[in-house]
Image: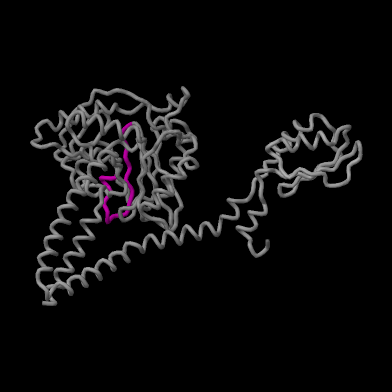
Amino acid sequence: MKTLLDQINHRLRRGISETLSGNSRQDLLNSVTDTLMLFGDELVHAKGGRTHRIAIGIYDRLSLKSGEFNGDTDRARQSIEGEIDAEAIAEAAKQLLSDSDSEPSILLLLAPSEFLATEQHMPGLSGANLISAITLQQESILPACDEKLALAVSDEGSDGYRLAMWVREARLTALFQAFSRRGLTLAALAPRTLTAMKPSQTGLLLDDDGRDITLISARNGVLEQWLQIQKTDLAEPVFLEQWLKQLAAFESETNHTLTTAQDYVLEQTAGIEPAYGFFPSDALASSRKRMQRKQIQIGAALIFAILGLAASPFLTQTFELQMANASLESKREVSVGARQDQTVVVEFENRWGAINDFPQQDVVAAMLRLQEVLGGEQLTSLELSEGLIRIQGTSSEPQEILQRLERDPLFTEVVFSRATSNTRYYIDLRLANVNFEAYRVRHFPDES
């Protein structure tokens, strides 16, 4: 009897862990029925190599030469040739899959020039915490970009360094909506170079479509380098020299070049890593609903199973104990990553908080405001230290100066520091937005 209960408990634990927890991204990739690749002005079916030429519409896209996103200047627009219209791609996909018996679920592979890669140092972070940390730093990572971006990054990396990939959220949404209008489901988006990346191999892949050259270096399925340049830039000696210098660093590694769509068809692997895929928000929402329905069904089945077991008085108590142990163990396993990430965040705050929170006195703004308030009155002495300003001067109306300083919101604690004569005054005041005392109490409590 105990052996039977152990078997039931083991199956329930594994089922709950793998099914109830779920993974929307992996679920979308598992649902893919067709993989389509964009190469030049052709859409290629990865299975069999069938192609359909696209009626191209040109729109502004990512400028990888400058490392900036779709700008407002003519110069930025001249540095790119454009991206193929989402509607044109969706129409070509509809024609290519016209003989499909059911609604296709599509993995769309785009040119690597539509993506941008940046290297981030994020030791100790993983999963949702890693994505949140990088997303919060988008403004400092890509300061010239004012568009909303989608992010893809793997938990794996060398010494805490991760290669983060970005694509415009508007591009992702436009493609999903264009496919939906034609009865097609766009499950995921990815650079086409990733499909030729073997998970267990280490080496280089060189994508050359006649317009852009992209070199990626991967180790055991994890991206380590992403170099890219427009071929027209190679006509410039400076750019050519830099490119050749970068390539020289990889001379000892195996280099595989992909220059045609057929090369990709021959090199096609089973799919892509979920960490490097871009998933439309609507597709993720649909996947979550589907998984919730599945969870409800499994939950109902579990309830019936529990009720059946509870009908036997000899098994009920033992079964409940086993389930409680399984739940406790599962929660312990789930919380390990969160506790580790919390420790990293606390350590980061302890190490860098004193620097990040150091009060900014903004001396230039304070001096300009002081000049406005004094209105041309002459100062004989001025000191500024830790938000405290000491001024001395001569004026026919010292009391009027004191009152003007008290009324200004930038200053506080305005007092005469010493006896004031009819013409000479001594005034102490503080910057209202600077509080060194609170800073010391928080970061140096033993010294305050």
Nearer to the camera, 227 or 154: 154
Disc tally is 0
Nearer to the camera, 21 or 232: 21
Nearer to the camera, 309 or 44: 309
In magenta, the rendered stretch is 194-210
Question: In the image, is 48 to the left or to the right of 81?
Answer: left
Question: In the image, is 422 to the left or to the right of 410?
Answer: right
Q: Residue at x 61, y 58 (%)?
A: 443
* Residue 208 is one of the magenta-drawn residues: yes
Q: Is residue 284 above or below residue 86?
A: below
The quadrant of the rendering that contains the N terminus is bottom left
* Residue 227 is one of the magenta-drawn residues: no
Q: Mark yes or no: residue 178 visible.
A: yes
Question: In the image, is 52 to the left or to the right of 66?
Answer: left
User: Residue reaching furthest right?
Assistant: 422
Q: Residue at x 75, y 31 (%)?
A: 372
Q: Mark yes or no: residue 263 visible.
A: no
**Quadrant position of residue 331:** bottom left
Colouring chosen for the image of the structure: one colour
Q: Residue at x 78, y 36 (%)?
A: 403
Residue 17 placed where, x, y %?
23, 60
Residue 121 placed where, x, y %?
46, 52
Residue 328 placed where, x, y %?
29, 68
Question: In the image, is 446 to the left or to the right of 126?
Answer: right
Q: Is residue 55 above or below residue 330?
A: above
Residue 58 placed where, x, y %?
32, 23
**Quadrant position of residue 88:** top left
The quadrant of the rendering that contains the C terminus is bottom right
Q: Is residue 321 above or below residue 96?
A: below
